[in-house]
Structure formats: structure tokens, C-alpha cells
């Protein structure tokens, strides 16, 4: 490794204060900052930082016995991003639980995304995923992962959906929250009418939908796939305004997990249209 | 509620000892017993107990303020299944963490499944899921959930796969581990050759597969879908012996989560064959 690393021995050292009580801070939010955890996510953050388009690293903390293993990733960050190391005793003392991964970065939003610009930048055959009231961070991460795997161009979340910059959402997304263009905010119906005006076929996913997913005609233009809240699903006004599609099911259980449903629908849309082969 | 409930005030009371240190016991196993957690899973256990085919309840522990809400489920268990109640202070003291759900049952395997009988009982158009080295309990639970939703007839797990009777796997499966016919044990290749001999088209799922899932011809007879270990996937000898199929992907991330991949493949197989409409 070609960069300096500062060893920290005092859990109360101010330089590593942002990593303190990670779980509790996750809950209250970090106002424009986030925790990237694990080597895979750190690698994605390094790529994002190099582009400086949206996310950058503020500082990095690595267990001393993990330093060698992530040296190539650390070398990809500019020299002005401080890298600290500590023992597992110090890390467990500050993080508040056993941090087996031992690779943490504090990230920062460098440029807040502009909704209109994001929509304007989408390609003519765009595929976007819209989350309405998605409340579980694991599901949010999985939706991003599946959206990335099936080549979606963006993820939009209404204002009632959870923040995908939550530590666990980023981790479950395998870092794709830091790569995929996305925007969170606004009323669901407002988002969907904007998409319709921008040339999107808006498809809502619901067990009550009339059209089975496998009978869905490939879109002639742009496609928006809309997912509802865990359990409750999408509200009636949205289902009546936009084509509801159902995933055929045996009826032996209530319904699919929302992120799995998203994966299945994205697979079907992406393969039926030839977007993914 | 028409049944007696015994209030327990001492965390060290022997009658609730099996619920002590739940997480630690999860790791060492319970030799023929398991923990059913939450109202949905308790309801499934009540159904299983009524049939007495495979699983029965040994005892039940419910937070006193949750008793009324689950009264109808408790009434479905025979009177000789003891029901205990306690305060959240007692429950947290014995379970070792905040048990917000407050609904627990100790279950017992009444009849161990016989592999040959299970195979012999499968219908002529059977769809089964086979897990090889599946190691994560969340994924095991999700595989069972998806298998149930797409009408699979059984789940088979090789001896290196994790135990689906682990508390979290049962919960994530929404109780379907207690409903779906399944068997765990044996070498993977042994399982697959047995299935082939029993008239199954054996389909292995792998990102390296030549055939895209959406080009897969509907099976003329029985179908076995084979899933590999998280990360590593299926071993080479299995992929070379049985048709490997891939789910088309963008290549922007390593691969799908194994349970999501199972959901997508089951959706495709079940809809293409008209098994689910």
C-alpha cells in the first residue's frame, strides 16, 4: 500500500467519532452522510469517488488485520481521504456490536441529484423502478440489487419510502445504491404522472392485478415498474389509474416478498423486450 | 379463549426453559425440536399439529398482552399442549434480546420424513427444488417461501445445506417449512441421480449456464430445479452432468441472490408449463 494509515488506539478519538454507535445513528440518520460497510461496497465507493459525480468518501476505518486485504481498494482513493486503522477491541467498543467485517467508510453526498435532470437524462427505451412506501431497508437494498442486475436505468422512491443510504440497504444492494441513478422524494401520484408525461408505460405490481405478468406485452417505449408497501401493497387510487399486473401464484401463501416480486417482474420485462439476453 | 393459560413470573421456571437463550440455542441445534415464532407461523403450526403428520407443538409461550390477539390460534391446539404467558420483562430475560413478537412455540418432529416415500408420493408432473450447500438460513426460508408460492411439490436439501427448522428460516418462509414436504440429507449427486431415475428433468441454475432461462422448453414430465451455494454456486461435476440454465443478467453485479434466482426460475417454469396461471 502506498498511502499513510493512522493507527487509532483510543475509542474516544474524535477522528473516528462518526463510526461510533453505528446502529443508533442509522436510525436517526446522518444528514447527507452514510456508512459504507465491507470490501465490496468500499470498492464501489472508490469508483464513485473517482467520478465525483454524486458520492465521495469522507474518511475510512479498517481493522488493522484487514488492511493488507483491502490495500488495492484504499490506493484508489485520493490521498486527502484519511484512512484510520484500529484493533477489533477498539472497533467493537465504538461500533457497539461485533463488526466482523471491519471495513467501514463514512461517505458524503457530493452532489444532490436533481429529479428533472435525472428524468431528462433517461434513454428512449428507459426502464425505471418506482417504490411507493417501501419501508424495509433490506428490501430497498434488494430492489436496487435486482434493478441493477436487470439493467434498469434508475430507481425512484416516493417521500414515504425509506432512505436507501441506510447502511444495511447499501450493503444488501451490493453497493448498487452508490452506482444506480436514483431519487427519493415527492408524492407517488406526482412521480407516476410525471413519468407518464415523459413517455413511460406505467405498470403497477399487485396480487389483485388483472393482467398476468407473463401475458404483458413488451413496451413500445419506456417502462416504469411500480412497487408498493410491504404487506399493504399499492393504494387503490394508483392501481386504478395505472395498469395493475399480477405475478401468477399458487395462492398457498399471502404473497411474494416485494424485492423478489420486483426481480421476477424485471426479469420478465427485460427478457421479453430483449433488453437483456 | 377456552383454554387454560399458566402465568410464569420466574425467568428460571423450568417450564419455559426451552425458550431460554434462543439465539445461542439456534446455533447449536435442538435435536428434533424447533422454535416457531410469530402469529403467522404459530397458525401454520396449529394446522400441522391438527394433521399430526410431521410436526406438533410441545409448548407455547405468549406475552400476556398478546394473548387476546392470538386466542383463536391457541384454541386450535389440543388441550394437552401447555400454554404459558409472561411479561415482556420475563421474556426479554429468558430470550436474551428484545422479543417484540412475543409469540413463541416449541415444536417437535413427530414423524421423520422418509426420502423414498417422499419421492414415491410425488405427482406425475412434480416440480421440486433441490438445494446444494445452501448455507444461509434467510435464503433457505426464502427458497421455501418461493417454492410454496409457485406451487412446488417438495424441497430437497443435500446434507451440506443448512437446517430449514432453524427459527429464522421458519419465520422467513412464512411458516412454509412446516407445510411443504421436504427432506434434508445425502450427497447432492446421489439426490440428483435418484431424481433423474424417477423421471425428472434436472435443471441446474448457474450464471455460467448456456441456456437462458426464458428459452427453456417446458418439461414434458417432472422438473427438478437445482440451486447452489451462495457465492460459489454449484460444483463443476454437477453442472456438467445436468443441464445448466442461466438467468440473463446485465453483468453490472456479480449475480442474483440465490433465493431471488429460485423465485425467478420457479416463476418461469411454473408459468411456461401452465402449472400456475
Image (cartoon, coloured by chain):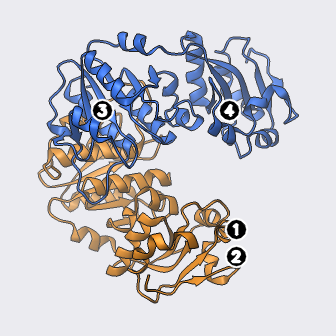
Chain colours: A blue, B orange
Helix, strand or loop at mark 2:
loop
* Mark 2–mark 1 CB contact (< 8 Å): yes
Instruction: Using the image as rendered, state which of residue A36 and residue B269 is in the foreground.
Output: A36
Can you tell which of label 2 and label 4 is closer to the viewer?
2
- Examine the rendering and report whether any part of residue B210 can be seen: no
Distance in Å between CA atoms under marks 1 and 4: 33 Å
Distance in Å between CA atoms under marks 4 and 3: 32 Å
Q: Which mark is residue B93?
A: 1
Instruction: Using the image as rendered, state which of residue A56 and residue A68 is in the foreground.
Output: A56
Where the C terminus of chain A falls, by quadrant? Answer: top left
Left or right of residue B196: residue A37: right
Q: Residues within 10 Å of mark 3 (few under 14, many from 20)?
A: many
Q: Which residue is mark 4?
A: A103
Can you tell which of label 3 and label 2 is closer to the viewer?
2
Are discs 1 and 3 located on one and the same chain?
no
Q: Residue at x 55, y 23 (%)?
A: A44
Instruction: Using the image as rendered, state which of residue B274 and residue B203 is in the foreground.
Output: B274
Chain containing mark 1: B
* Mark 3–mark 2 CB contact (< 8 Å): no
The answer to whether residue A60 is above or below residue B176 is above
Are discs 1 and 4 located on one and the same chain?
no
Q: Which residue is mark 3?
A: A266
Where the N terminus of chain A falls, by quadrant? Answer: top right
Q: Residue at x 39, y 25 (%)?
A: B251
Are discs 3 and 2 located on one and the same chain?
no
Distance in Å between CA atoms under marks 1 and 3: 45 Å
Distance in Å between CA atoms under marks 2 and 1: 7 Å
Can you tell which of label 1 and label 4 is closer to the viewer?
1
User: Along the polypeptide, which appears first: circle 4 or circle 3?
Assistant: 4
Res A242 quadrant in image: top left
Chain containing mark 2: B
Q: Which residue is mark 2?
A: B11
Amino acid at each position: 500500500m502506498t498511502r499513510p494509515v493512522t493507527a487509532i488506539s483510543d475509542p474516544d478519538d474524535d477522528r473516528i467519532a462518526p463510526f461510533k454507535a453505528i446502529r443508533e445513528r442509522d436510525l436517526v440518520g446522518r444528514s447527507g452522510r452514510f456508512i459504507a460497510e465491507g470490501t465490496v461496497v468500499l470498492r464501489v465507493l472508490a469508483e464513485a469517488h473517482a467520478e465525483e459525480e454524486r458520492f465521495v468518501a469522507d474518511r475510512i476505518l479498517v481493522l488493522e488485520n484487514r488492511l493488507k486485504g483491502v490495500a488495492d481498494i484504499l490506493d484508489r482513493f485520493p490521498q486527502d481521504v484519511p484512512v484510520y486503522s484500529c484493533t477489533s477491541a477498539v472497533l467493537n467498543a465504538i461500533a457497539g456490536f461485533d463488526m466482523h467485517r471491519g471495513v467501514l467508510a463514512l461517505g458524503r453526498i457530493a452532489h444532490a441529484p436533481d429529479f428533472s435532470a435525472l428524468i431528462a437524462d433517461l434513454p428512449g427505451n428507459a426502464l425505471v423502478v418506482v417504490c411507493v412506501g417501501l419501508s424495509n431497508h433490506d428490501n430497498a437494498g434488494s430492489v436496487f440489487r435486482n434493478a441493477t442486475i436487470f439493467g434498469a436505468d434508475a430507481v425512484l422512491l416516493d417521500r414515504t419510502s425509506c432512505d436507501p443510504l441506510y447502511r444495511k440497504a447499501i450493503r444488501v444492494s451490493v453497493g448498487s445504491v452508490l452506482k444506480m441513478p436514483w431519487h427519493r422524494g415527492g408524492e407517488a401520484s406526482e412521480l407516476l404522472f410525471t413519468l407518464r408525461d415523459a413517455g413511460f408505460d406505467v405498470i403497477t405490481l399487485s396480487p389483485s392485478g388483472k393482467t398476468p405478468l407473463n401475458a404483458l406485452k413488451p413496451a413500445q417505449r419506456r417502462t416504469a415498474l411500480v412497487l408498493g408497501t410491504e404487506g399493504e401493497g399499492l393504494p387503490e387510487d394508483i392501481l386504478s389509474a395505472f395498469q395493475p399486473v399480477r405475478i401468477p401464484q399458487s395462492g398457498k401463501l399471502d404473497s411474494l416478498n416485494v424485492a423478489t416480486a420486483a426481480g421476477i417482474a424485471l426479469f420478465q420485462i427485460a427478457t421479453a423486450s430483449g433488453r437483456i439476453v
